[in-house]
Image: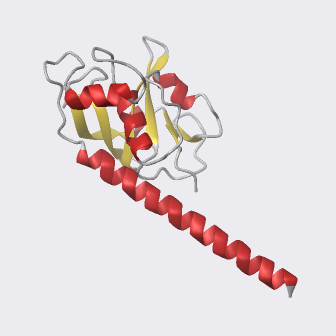
Amino acid sequence: MRTIIATICYLLIWNYSVGQSILIREKVEKTYLSQVGVREATGHNDGVDVETYLAAVNFGKGYAWCAAFVSWVYTQNGVKNPRSAWVPSWFNNSQNIIWARDGIKNQTPLPGDVFGIYYQQAKIIGHIGFIHRFGDRITITVEGNTNSEGSNEGDGVYMKRRPTRQLYKIARYIKE
């Protein structure tokens, strides 16, 4: 009898936590989608919304803000995150990495997971954004501080169609 009760309790708790993570993932998705169309005021990493994103990582106007945008979205929805404007810090913890171009592919990326793009010349992961719809060949993303060409120094928040091969790593901060 104890085993049955313990199993029922476990299943109830597990179902509740899975339900909570789905709800959080949906809220994160709604938040980042609501920001598509935000643009810098003068093209110099500034403007009310951009400065709000930067404030989420304790930076002021003028700094690159793709990671600040991700941090702001997560923070708005209670998701624990590095709260860092330094893109590589988002991919330091191997426990968060769920997919990598060169090997790890142990979980299918979901909306609200974050991708990093590696820049060979700089030898660094230098841009971050949200996975919106992951595909084997094309992935739909939502990212800040980009532009219609997909730059890592753009002018706004855009929804992009990126070749999946451009993505270097994908990390999960919304825990299941």
Q: Is residue 176 left or right of residue 52?
A: right
Q: Is residue 76 visible?
A: yes
Vertical relation: 82 (above or below) 34: above
The quadrant the C terminus occupies is: bottom right
Vertical relation: 50 (above or below) 133: above
Task: Between residue 142 and residue 48, name the one nearer to us.
Answer: 48
Q: Residue furthest right?
A: 2
Q: Is residue 84 left or right of residue 96?
A: left
Task: Between residue 60 and residue 126, name the one nearer to us.
Answer: 60
Q: Is residue 150 visible?
A: no
Image location of residue 93, percent across then percent down: 63, 32
Q: Is residue 73 left or right of residue 5?
A: left
The quadrant the N terminus occupies is: bottom right
Task: Between residue 116 and residue 54, name the one nearer to us.
Answer: 54
- Residue drawn at point x = 28 percent, y = 14 percent: 62
Image location of residue 86, percent across then percent down: 47, 21
